[in-house]
Structure formats: structure tokens, C-alpha cells
Amino acid sequence: YAAKQRQSGSQLYSPSLDAGSQESLSLLGELRRAVEGGQLRLFLQPKVDLRSGQVISAEALVRWEHPQRGLVPPMQFIPFAEQTGFIRQLSAWVVAASARAWRQARERGQVLRISVNLSTRDLMDQDLPLKIRAAIEAEGVPPSALCLEITESAIMDDPARALSTLEQLSAMGFKLSIDDFGTGYSSLAYLKRLPVDELKIDKSFVMAMERDLDDAKIVRSTVELAHNLGLSVVAEGLETLRAWQILARLGCDEGQGYFISKPMPEAQFVDWLEQWKPPALDAEDPPESLF
Ligand code: C2E
Ligand code: MG
Ligand code: MG
Ligand code: MG
């Protein structure tokens, strides 16, 4: 029964819902009450420097703690929130919660950068940069402590408008990152004009690179591309020690993935951080040549 309920839950929040339907309207009400009633949860996933093993930042990933359905993953409500425009309120909640998490870590002596995901509708909002800055300044967080992750498709929906928002954010001192790099449809000619600081290699390539030579080549080329453009590069989906070794050898700057930690409730994060010990990479045999 529980499995069945979960299944119907995932259908309820599917992006194929007709935005004008009765069902959709009641979902929107539910989502609004979720934000106002404190049902959203901030999870954090660490990102490490692949050379030193030190945690230098964390990605904010939202979950909905639904009174009946339990912890609902973001892919079951983010697309719906994006379709209905409710994503703006949701993003505002995530930014404010991330700023609080940053300040709490700071009070315990941990200086981190926090990455927050933004969607197309966020980028279309010309007031977004000022809103984000006001929200984080209220918690004493400098813009340079916040990195905003944007997918290629979010940018390509309306490139001119996205570029204007990104330029404002960059001028204010926020860090900018292209998420899921390699899965979208942006052209390199366009990407090079964006004021971004970081590329995140999509986890599909990283998770497959140990068994598929083409994926490994894509990872290697993306690291080179990023560095040639003066950007830092992050691998998501780092699930094994061997993946860490390969990525470090390719010169990838940072890694994020289940091998280091799954996303965890924010309350656990600082404790996790205090006990984190990077693996002894040198003691392991270096991976044989893959390429
Ligand atoms: P994303 O921004 O690309 O985030 C990375 C996703 O990969 C997360 O899934 C994370 O849990 C997962 N992941 C990280 N390491 C590994 C790994 O080693 N193996 C595997 N299999 N997965 C890994 P999650 O938390 O379910 O989030 C999915 C997507 O939902 C995110 O992808 C992002 O696009 C969106 N999302 C999450 N939170 C927010 C938010 O606050 N706002 C917006 N606009 N989107 C969000
Ligand atoms: Mg992301
Ligand atoms: Mg990603
Ligand atoms: Mg992704």
C-alpha cells in the first residue's frame, strides 16, 4: 500500500499536469501552504576540493516534508512550481534558508560557500538580483559566499534576458555556475559570453566514466574546456574512490557525490563537517590509464 501511495504521489506532481486544471489548482494551494506552513526542508550536500579533500562548499537541495506523503524529492514538485510561477516564492525560501545555514556554520567556525539552484522563471525576474542581495544581507552573508547554479536550458529559454540578470548578479559579487553541463542545448559561442565562474559536469557522464570510454572522454574534454575558459570545474555524481582518483588526475577542481556524502538535513551538516576526513588518496594505487 505504501509503495502504491508513493507511486501515485509521483504522478500527482508530474510536470505533465495541465496548469489550468482543478487538480493543479489544489496542488498549487498545497504547495503554497507547504512554504507558509514550514514543510520545506533544506538539505545540504558537501563539495570537496579534489586535491586537498577539504570541504569548501555545499549545495542547497530542497525537499518537501509532506504530512501524508513523507519526504518528497524536488523533481516531483520543482517542475510544477516552475510551470505555475510559484518557483519564485520557493526560490526565495531556499535563498533565505541557505543564508541562515551559512551564518550558523560561520558561528561554529566553518566558512563555506553555499550553492543555490535557480530556474528559468527566476532568471526572467529583473528584480531577482536585488531581492537575493537583500535576503542574504539580512543574515550578514556576503554575495561572494553564494553561488547560483543555472542550467543551460534555463538560460536558453530567453538568452538576452538571462544574460542581463546574470550580469547584474555577477556585478554584485555572486558566483555563477552552469549546472548539468553537457546535457543542454546552449552553444559554446553563447556560453563564452556568460559571466560564469564554474562548470558542473553532469552526473550522467561522471557516473558512467569508469565503464564507458566516451563518457570518460567527455569528462576529460569538459575539464580542459573549463580551464581553457578560465573557469573552475566540478564533477557531480562522484560515487567511488576510483572516480575521485580519475577526476583528480584529470585536474578536475571539485567533486560532489554519494562517495563523499548524500545530501543531508541542514541540522546534521555542521556535525558531519567536523568529523569529515578525506580518504588517503596517495596510499591507493593510481588508476591505470583510462584513455
Ligand atoms: P542538481 O542541481 O543537478 O543537483 C544534483 C542532484 O544530484 C541532487 O538530486 C543530488 O542529490 C544528486 N546527486 C548528487 N550526488 C549524487 C551521486 O553521487 N549519485 C546520484 N545518483 N545522485 C547524486 P536532488 O536533490 O534530487 O535534486 C534534483 C534536482 O532538483 C537538482 O539537480 C535541481 O535541478 C533541482 N533542485 C533541487 N533543489 C532545488 C531548489 O532549491 N531550487 C531549484 N530551482 N531546483 C532544485
Ligand atoms: Mg545544482
Ligand atoms: Mg547538476
Ligand atoms: Mg542534475
Image (spheres, rainbow, N blue to C red):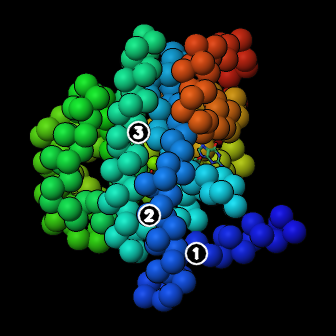
Q: Position of residue 126 (x, y in %)?
A: 15, 59
Q: Secondary structure at mark 2?
A: helix
Circle 2 crowding by C-alpha within 10 Å: few under 14, some 14–19, many from 20: some
Q: Are marks 3 and 2 in contact (CB under 8 Å)?
A: no
Q: In front of the other: label 1 or label 2? A: 2
Amino acid type at mark 3: Ala
Mark before the other along the chain sequence, 3 or 2? 2
Picture quadrant where residue 14 is located: bottom right
Picture quadrant where residue 114 is located: top left
Residue 32's disc number: 2
Marks 1 and 2 sit apart, C-alpha to C-alpha, by 17 Å
Q: Secondary structure at mark 3?
A: helix
Amino acid type at mark 1: Ser
| Residue drawn at x 40%, y 46% as measured from the top left | 94
| Residue drawn at x 38%, y 62% as measured from the top left | 87
Amino acid type at mark 2: Arg
Residue under numbered circle 3: 97
Residue under numbered circle 1: 14
Q: Assess mark 1: CB under 8 A from ligand 1?
A: no
Mark before the other along the chain sequence, 1 or 3? 1
Between residues 25 and 16, which one lies in front from this camera angle? 25
